[in-house]
Amino acid sequence: MTKVILCGALGRMGRAILRLSLEYNNLEVTAGVEHPDCLRDQDLGKAVGMEEFKGRVLTSRLEEALPLGDVVVDFTGSPTAALAHAKLSAYARKPVVIGTTGFSQQQVEELKELSNLAPILLSPNMSLGVNLLFRLAQIAVKALRDKNFDVEILEIHHRFKKDAPSGTALKLLEVSAQALDKDPSQVGKFGREGIDPRGDEIGVMSLRGGDVVGEHTLYLIGFGERIELTHRATSRDIFARGTLEACLWIKDKPPGFYTMLDVLEI
């Protein structure tokens, strides 16, 4: 049995992870962690209104919950909080799965350093399908790199999403640029306006509106033909399921810095 400590337990993703964890007979969420301003009850089940989790700890201090689980999951939405949780977990030699996004490069380097103590998995998108898209993008861009194809990325999300481009779009930019042996920071072009012919770049465009869960398309545009690799999310449950699969996978892994591509073994 894999016992999970869930940081960000009362958030939208946290509640989805709790609900879907009930479908697993080899995994259970044994404790929750949440920001102190959100705590109204120290009983996880009562706080989320789910009978199955009554009697399980909900706290604002991860160190109090660490003895209760095998794997720590962070969906706090705060890179600062996630990094702090990763430090506590790594020092306790507990594996960590991080779904929080928005880390600076310096923070990512800190996570990589901590992964020398315990396994840490960081992914901008926990969906199994999206991570397969990353690998397909890498293969396609590399195959056509010298064949006069232009690479473009388009992402669409609901009107309430705060960051643009999405972390997934930025990851698509990264893997595409790497397949071209280029630096993502030098070839990424975020939006276009004015009179400026297309150069040696990868365009990244963001649309926001309505209740779109998430859609990402990688375009490979040649002369007389076009390839589109698209992933459409119709439910946020895909991110929770991917997270739970990552927890099962990472439990007995050695220290190291991992991604969902490792979970998929691709």
Image (spheres, rainbow, N blue to C red):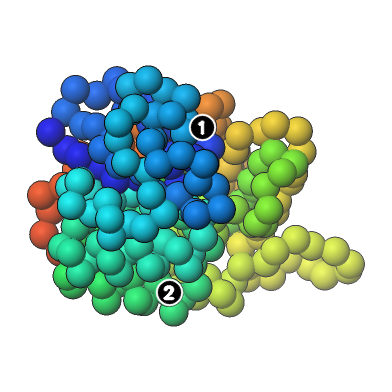
| 233 left or right, relative to 7 | right
Q: Name the residue under label 1.
A: 236
- The front one of 221 and 245 is 245
Is 141 on the left or on the right of 250, as rendered? right
Q: Where is residue 161 in the image (x, y as percent from the top left)?
A: 67, 47
Q: Residue at x 20, y 46 (%)?
A: 69
8 sits to left or right of 200:
left
Residue 60: % across, % down: 41, 54
The image shows a total of numbered marks equal to 2
Residue 191 vs residue 181, the one in the foreground: 191
Considering the image in quadrants, where does the N terminus appear? top left
Residue flagged by tag 2: what amino acid is it? Gln
198 is higher (above) or lower (below) than 186: above
Name the residue nearer the viewer: 169 or 73. Answer: 73
Q: Residue furthest front?
A: 41
Q: Mark 2 points at which residue?
A: 107
* Distance (Cα) linking label 2 and label 1: 26 Å
Most extreme residue toward the right is 194
Residue in view at x 17 percent, y 38 percent: 2
Q: Which amino acid does label 1 sit on?
A: Arg
- Location of residue 205 by image quarter: bottom right
Residue 81 in sight from this viewpoint:
yes
